[in-house]
Every structure is written in C-alpha cells, then in structure tokens.
C-alpha cells in the first residue's frame, strides 16, 4: 500500500495503471474509518484491480460553528485498516495542495442542496460537491463508492456526476449498523453512554414508520407525527427534521406509496446524527 500526499503524483501513478488497463475503485473519506467505510472498501476491492481511499477532513464542508477542529483524525489506525483491507493507494493530501491561495471555484448542485440537511448546514453540500469533483479529477476512478447513510450527499453527488458528464459509475452501498441498530458514523464517538442509548431512537423511529407503512399507512404527515412522538420521549434528543421524501428529487411526499425515502436528523446532546430508510 502506498501513501501519497501529492495530487499530481497520485494522478501520475494512477494514469500508469489505467494505461495497463487496470480498473480503479475510489472510496472518498474523511478518515476515522469504521465498518461502514470498510464495507465500501471491501466492495471496491471485489470490483476493481486498484483500490484508492482518500483521507481528507475537508474544511469547506464544515460550518463555522461545526466540529472541524474536534473531528477525529486517527491516521495510523486508519492506515492499518486500509492495509488490512488490501487498499493499494491512500491519498492523504495537505489542505494547501487542495485549496491553494486564490482558490475560488465551487461546484453547486442547485435545488437538491436546499432541502433536509442543507437547511441547518448551509454551504455544506457545496463543500462536498467541490471536494468530490476535485478528487474525481485527481483520481479519475472507474467507480465511486458512497454510503447510503449520507443519502442526501449520495443523491447530490449522483446528480453532479450526471450533470457534469463525469465518466464514473457511482455505487451506493447499504447502511452498516451496530447490533442494536445505530447507524455507524464517525460522530458516534462523541456520544457518552446515555446519549449512545438515546441515539437508538433514530433507527427505532425508522422501524416504527416502516411498520406503519407495511401495515397500510400512507399519510406521510401522520407517520411523521408518530415518529416525532417517539423521538421526543428521549430527554437528550432534539429533532432537526423528520421527513418522507421522493428518493430522487428529495421533495416531501404527501402519500407514501411505491418508492420513498424516510430521513431524519436529530441532535443527541451536542451531536447531530442522521439516518434513513430507502424503499426503491
Ligand atoms: O462522506 C464523507 O466522508 C465526506 O462528505 C466526503 C464524501 C469524503 C467528502 O469530503
């Protein structure tokens, strides 16, 4: 496994592989790798000759009051995990090589970046689309692996790839959960014991909604109300949003039928967690 910091060097190395006809799978991350990331890496390993993982805590996707400074950065543990999973290249760029002085070009996916998480995280998706567009230019992979856990990010990035004719296939992999149902996230590390217990309410609320829907409920407002009532029973929890939306447009649905996406974002203490359920 090679650790490369320079964008031009990794671009050159991967070009050599491409000339040899080797297919490249790419997993972009901000590090603090957990089983969710590893599931993407394993899929990339199964599908491709070469697997590239990037580790870059992208400052442009954090708001001024968000957790950029305290975001976990366990680099040596991450590198060990990558080595164990058979990753070929880890791209670990410096901030100044990604955003040199005078940097002023951003990618905006309009519309989709107005709903859900975008409301309480203004500018977040602009930061995500900008960094992922840059990484796709540097790595030029055949396949990009994303997690369903960050479903709005995945929908927006798929739109970006399509709209900008970026020649990459996007694979969205299922959410990985701990045994008790909590969706894995690097931010779970912020939770204390009680918050960790209260955080289970996210997956419980999703389960409750799916139970109602499977038993014939279709009025989105009523389903959301029952989810909110369940969540609000937990002391340390504050709802950001609970919505049932169209999986492609992310617009709220009135009637739940066919394909739908249930999404929620909830503050547990000072930690904002997200989760979702997708029926295609
Ligand atoms: O999902 C993440 O970890 C980040 O948003 C990503 C895609 C690596 C871009 O910084």
Image: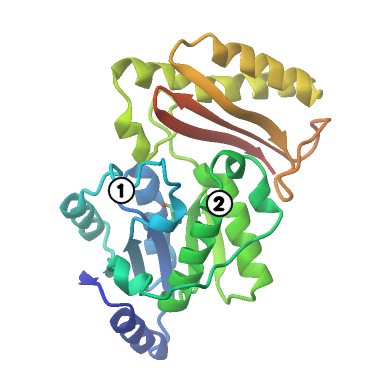
Mark 1 and mark 2: Cα distance apart in space: 18 Å
- Seen at 41% across and 77% down, the residue is 138
Q: Nearer the viewer, mark 1 or mark 2?
A: 2
Specify few, some or many for label 2: CA neighbours under 10 Å numbering under 14, 14-19, or 20 or more: many
Q: How many marks?
A: 2
Mark 1 residue element: loop
In-image side of 205 versus 95 (left or right): right
- Seen at 83% across and 31% down, the residue is 254
- Seen at 46% across and 32% down, the residue is 273
- Residue designated by label 1: 33
Q: Given the current orientation, which residue lies at the most extreme front position? A: 102
Residue 29 image position (x, y, % from top left): 37, 56
Mark 2 residue element: helix
Q: Which of 69 and 159 is in front in this view?
A: 69
Q: Does label 2 point to a residue whose CB lies under 8 Å from ligand 1?
A: yes
Q: Which of 231 and 213 is in front in this view?
A: 231
Specify few, some or many for label 1: CA neighbours under 10 Å numbering under 14, 14-19, or 20 or more: many
Q: In which quarter of the image is residue 16?
A: bottom left
- Residue designated by label 2: 153
């Amino acid at each position: 496994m090679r650790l490369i910091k320079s964008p031009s060097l990794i671009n050159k190395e991967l070009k050599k592989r491409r000339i040899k006809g080797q297919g490249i799978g790419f997993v972009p991350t901000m590090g603090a790798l957990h089983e969710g990331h590893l599931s993407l890496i394993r899929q990339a390993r199964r599908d491709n000759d070469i697997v590239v993982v990037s580790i870059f805590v992208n400052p442009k996707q954090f708001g001024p009051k968000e957790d950029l400074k305290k975001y976990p950065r366990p680099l040596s543990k991450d590198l060990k995990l990558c080595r164990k999973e058979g990753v070929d290249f880890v791209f670990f760029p410096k901030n100044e090589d990604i955003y040199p002085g005078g940097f002023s070009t951003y990618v905006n996916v309009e519309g989709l970046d107005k709903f859900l998480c975008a409301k309480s995280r203004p500018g977040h998706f602009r930061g995500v689309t900008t960094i992922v567009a840059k990484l796709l230019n540097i790595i030029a992979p055949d396949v990009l692996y994303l997690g369903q856990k960050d479903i709005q990010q995945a929908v927006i990035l798929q739109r970006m790839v399509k709209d900008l004719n970026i020649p990459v296939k996007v694979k969205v992999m299922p959410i990985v959960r701990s045994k008790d149902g909590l969706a894995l996230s690097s931010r779970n590390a912020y939770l204390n014991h009680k918050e960790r217990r209260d955080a289970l309410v996210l997956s419980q609320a999703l389960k409750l909604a799916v139970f109602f829907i499977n038993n014939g409920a279709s009025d989105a407002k009523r389903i959301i109300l029952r989810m909110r009532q369940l969540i609000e029973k937990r002391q340390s929890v504050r709802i950001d949003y609970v919505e049932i939306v169209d999986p492609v447009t992310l617009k709220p649905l009135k009637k739940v039928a066919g394909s739908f996406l249930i999404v929620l974002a909830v503050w547990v203490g000072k930690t904002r967690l997200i989760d979702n359920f997708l029926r295609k």
